[in-house]
Image (cartoon, grey):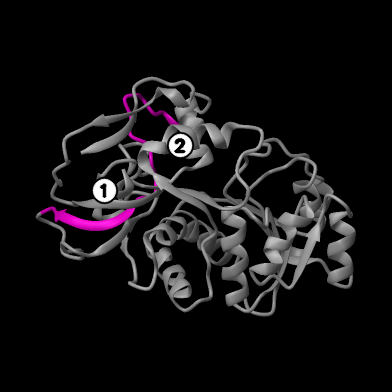
Amino acid sequence: MKAMVFNEFGPPDVLHYEDRPVPDPGSDDLVMQVHAVSVNRVLDVEIRSGRAPHYGVTPPHIPGVDPSGVVVAVGDNVTEFAVGDRVSATLTMPKGGRYGIECDGGDAEYALAPAGCCVKVRDEVGFAEATVISRHGPVAYNLLFRHGKLEAGQTVLILGASGNLGSIGIQLAKAAGATVIAAAGSADRASVGAELGADYAVNYGEIDLVDAVMEITEGQGVNLFYDNIANPDFCSKGIECLARHGRMVTAGAHGGPVVPVNFHTVYNRQLTIKGDPQSIASDALPCFDAAAEGKLKAVIDRVVPLSKAPAMHALLESPEGVGVGKIILDPTLG
């Protein structure tokens, strides 16, 4: 089979399209023919570059943390999946570690994965959409509902409205009956939040975030602040938007990571700040249900052959970057 491999850390051209043997499943594993896998800005690009040594990846390594495809083989202990099933891999592995980081990932024609981190994909959901949802849906669901305790009738402020975690968070929160304030640093990116169903869209590049949120909430503030950027100029403002007993949740810090926090606000309002990047496989299922029912749309920038991975890594590292949405690699296209 063909796989995208880096044998050393460095620029995008350290990625090589190599021949590798098709993997055999262990007793608790499955093997899928990969139809989609995303290019993740941190878990693929930053690790490949060598700028993220704290993840502990040692080359040679096949990146790709979120493959989706069709099961072609299962291990002896696997009973919940069968050959022919449509599946996606989620990040957190059942015995610890993260798929595609502590083990080889899905940038290949065939990928080995622990069955315990995989979920079945409904027929109504395409593979590219499934990959975006399986990567970000469980993280967003965990943050919003397990940690954020978001309920119908409450108000949530979501920063990074056009980003992957932001766009899915907006839709899950709206489907749950919450009032959603989507915020971003430009009019175009804020408008993405409105298009995805947010009740209000705030361009904090032009107006003060705290003033806008307090006007929307009539001075009450929001119940939940959902941020996965840690921009030091605006994350602290999001905390100031929280109501008494409000909660902040996060699973990302690529815009920081150091953020100034007014702890007078934290303790006077009795706030909770919780971070958790884990992806619980079962949390992908309500996300797939929402997608199948037209309540959740995966935002995709483009779908290209796996062989184009070096160019896509270079694009993500370039000043222009990508517009909105995920870059998807499809190994079936070459």
Distance from disc 1 to disc 2, alpha carbons, whole Å, reads 17 Å
Q: Amino acid at mark 2?
A: Asp
Can you say which quadrant of the picture contains the N terminus? top left
Magenta residues, as a range?
55-75
Residue 112: image quadrant is: top left
The residue drawn where x is 72% and y is 42% is 231
Compared across the picture, whether 39 is left or right of 282 comes to right
Residue in front for this viewpoint, 232 or 193: 193
Residue in front for this viewpoint, 1 or 206: 1
Residue of label 2:
44
Residue in front for this viewpoint, 43 or 281: 43
The residue drawn where x is 52% and y is 38% is 42
Compared across the picture, whether 228 is left or right of 297 comes to right
Could you say where residue 284 lies in the image, as x and y percent from the top left? Answer: 42, 64
* Disc 2 residue crowd, few under 14, some 14–19, many 20+, Cα 10 Å: many
Residue placed farthest to the left in the image? Answer: 76
Pair 1/2: label in front: 2
Residue 271 within the magenta-colored segment of the rendering? no
Work out whether residue 97 can be spotted.
Answer: no
Residue 245: image quadrant is: bottom right
Q: How many marks?
A: 2
Q: Which mark is residue 113?
A: 1
By secondary structure, the bulk of the magenta-drawn segment is best described as loop
Could you say where residue 33 lies in the image, as x and y percent from the top left? Answer: 24, 51
